């Protein structure tokens, strides 16, 4: 068991998860506690790697599991199904999150900060402000990048005025042009050529369960949905493998066009009705105009039909 307090986000980490873990470590250290360490629960995607390279920061160490009693801080998630193996027996000291609270329980009181913002890093920005801790260029860049990522350059319906205000100030500190840097960053994440179909359906996938229905909603960002659909048959094969391996009732892959803010869904499993009740599937697919957010659009759609 590590003597350090471990800070991490969800499995299949995205930019907000990685940046928030690093920024939370910086904030705690600036407040006088050096016994903390940001770690990650999966591989770094290309978008996040672009941010780390730009900031000249090494990726956090990979963590596979935690032992009983390990002190941890969770960022960008709270559901145990999305967290590290062994989380049920860890000692959770704090949570900083912008998602719903679900299947979460602790034996002891803790600090819990949840806000309905577009990004966890927006919450961390406010924690810096409330603590009167100066935001330097490095952490400003990380938080700005996370906000750009989670809100798709402020175009996502999850975007709030808090995100807009935070991004404006953070971009000034980081000395970046939000649109230029942001578009380059998002485009870096749409380079999918090096990924196998199995990797694509696990690149940004989150598990949910409601009333005994096990579901995965995976998402890949692109600038051309048609290009991704050239791999449709192999993607379906990979999705069916995930269904069999994890005993899923439904697997949804959202192929999201970041430029035009639309998504094409591929839906497989024995409970495709969670989509079909409200949207007609043709050849296991449906095009959803204006849908880009898993948290605010796709998950409520699925859960409302279970």
Image (cartoon, grey):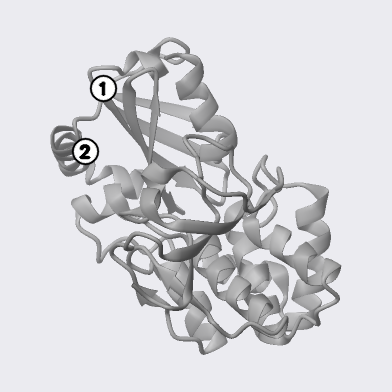
The quadrant in which residue 61 appears is: bottom left
Mark sitting on residue 91: none
Question: Is residue 189 left or right of 228 when viewed as pictured?
Answer: right
> Is residue 266 visible to the viewer in this orientation of the structure?
yes
Observer-nearest of 230 and 188: 188
| Depicted 40 relative to depicted 79: above or below | below
Q: What distance separates the C-alpha of mark 1 from that of mark 2? A: 15 Å
Q: Number of numbered discs present?
A: 2
Image location (x, y in percent) of residue 212: 33, 20
Q: Mark 1 highlights which residue?
A: 283
| Depicted 225 relative to depicted 4: above or below | above
Q: Are marks 1 and 2 in contact (CB under 8 Å)?
A: no
| Depicted 227 relative to depicted 305: above or below | below
Picture residue at 54% right of the left edge, 69% below the top: 21
Image location (x, y in percent) of residue 219: 40, 45
The kind of secondary structure element at disc 2 is helix
Q: Mark 2 highlights which residue?
A: 239
Which quadrant is the C terminus positioned in? Answer: top left
The kind of secondary structure element at disc 1 is loop
Image location (x, y in percent) of residue 155: 67, 48
Question: Is residue 120 left or right of 284 when viewed as pictured?
Answer: right
Question: Is residue 80 left or right of 262 when viewed as pictured?
Answer: left
Q: Residue furthest top?
A: 277
Image location (x, y in percent) of residue 17: 51, 61
Mark whose residue sits in front, 1 or 2:
2
> Is residue 219 visible to the viewer in this orientation of the structure?
no
């Amino acid at each position: 068991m590590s003597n350090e307090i471990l800070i991490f986000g969800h499995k299949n980490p995205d930019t907000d998860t990685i940046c928030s873990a690093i920024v939370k470590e910086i904030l705690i250290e600036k407040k006088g506690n050096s016994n903390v360490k940001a770690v990650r629960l999966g591989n770094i995607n290309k978008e996040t790697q672009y941010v780390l390279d730009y900031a000249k920061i090494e990726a956090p160490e990979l963590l596979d599991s935690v032992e009983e009693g390990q002190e941890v801080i969770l960022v960008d998630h709270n559901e145990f199904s999305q967290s590290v193996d062994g989380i049920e027996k860890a000692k959770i000291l704090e949570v900083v999150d912008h998602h719903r609270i679900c299947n979460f329980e602790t034996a002891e009181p803790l600090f819990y900060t949840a806000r309905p913002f577009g990004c966890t890093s927006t919450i961390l920005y406010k924690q810096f402000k409330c603590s009167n801790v100066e935001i330097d260029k490095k952490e400003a860049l990380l938080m700005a990048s996370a906000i750009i990522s989670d809100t798709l350059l402020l175009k996502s319906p999850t975007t709030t005025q808090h995100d807009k205000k935070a991004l404006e100030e953070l971009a000034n500190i980081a000395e970046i042009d939000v649109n230029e840097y942001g578009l380059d960053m998002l485009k870096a994440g749409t380079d999918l050529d090096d990924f196998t179909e199995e990797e694509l359906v696990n690149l940004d996938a989150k598990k949910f369960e409601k009333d005994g229905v096990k579901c995965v909603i995976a998402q890949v960002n692109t600038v051309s949905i048609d290009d991704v659909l050239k791999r449709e048959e192999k993607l379906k094969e990979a999705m069916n493998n995930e269904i069999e391996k994890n005993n899923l009732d439904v697997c949804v892959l959202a192929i999201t066009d970041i430029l035009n803010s639309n998504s094409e869904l591929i839906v497989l499993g024995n409970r495709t009705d969670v989509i079909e009740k409200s949207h007609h599937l043709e050849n296991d697919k449906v095009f959803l105009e204006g849908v880009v957010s898993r948290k605010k659009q796709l998950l409520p759609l699925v859960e409302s039909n279970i």
